[in-house]
Image: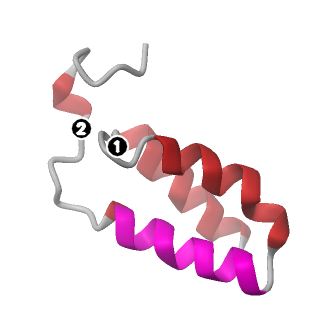
Amino acid sequence: MDSPSIDKKRELNGKIPYASTIGSIMYVMATTQPDLALAVMVVNWYMSHPRRKHWEAIKNIFGYL
């Protein structure tokens, strides 16, 4: 259901710095918050074809911080 060929209109189209944001969260995870490892791993799986729901997951991680 999350395959990139299905429903391409939900993709982020490169307008959001998805990889850079994940990198920032990884830095925080490595230095102070190791409990974020699972959440970071999951959003990292979709780095090549992120969708809006993955960006929402990143926003939830920031809300946790």
Q: Which mark is residue 23?
A: none
Q: Is residue 24 left or right of residue 33?
A: left
* Magenta-colored segment: predominant secondary structure: helix
Q: Residue at x 63, y 56 (%)?
A: 40
Figure quadrant of the N terminus: top left
The residue that disc 2 covers is 11
The three-letter code of the residue at mark 1 reads: Pro
Between residues 3 and 60, which one lies in front from this camera angle?
Answer: 3
Q: Position of residue 43 (x, y in %)?
A: 53, 48
Magenta stretch in the rendered image? 19-31
Which of pointers 1 and 2 lies earlier in the amino acid sequence? 2
Q: Mark 1 and 2 residues: CB-CB less than 8 Å, in contact?
A: yes
Q: Is residue 31 above or below residue 26?
A: below
Residue 47 at what x, y percent from top left?
Answer: 38, 49
Residue at the image position 15 percent from the left and 48 percent from the top: 13
- Res 19 → quadrant: bottom left
Which residue is at a point 53% across and 57% down the rendered structure image?
Answer: 58
The residue shown at (60%, 69%) is 62
Q: Where is residue 18 drawn, in percent x and y?
A: 35, 61
Whole-angstrom CA distance, mark 1 to mark 2, is 6 Å
Looking at numbered disc 2 in the image, what kind of residue is underneath it?
Answer: Glu
Report crowding for label 2: few under 14, some 14 to 19, many 20 or more residues within 10 A (C-alpha).
Answer: some
Is 51 included in the stretch rendered in magenta?
A: no
**Circle 2 — which element?**
loop
Quick check: 9 left or right of 18?
left
Q: Which residue, given by chain and number where applicable, does mark 1 sit on?
A: 50
**Numbered disc 1: secondary structure:** loop
Q: Residues within 10 Å of mark 1 (few under 14, many from 20)?
A: many
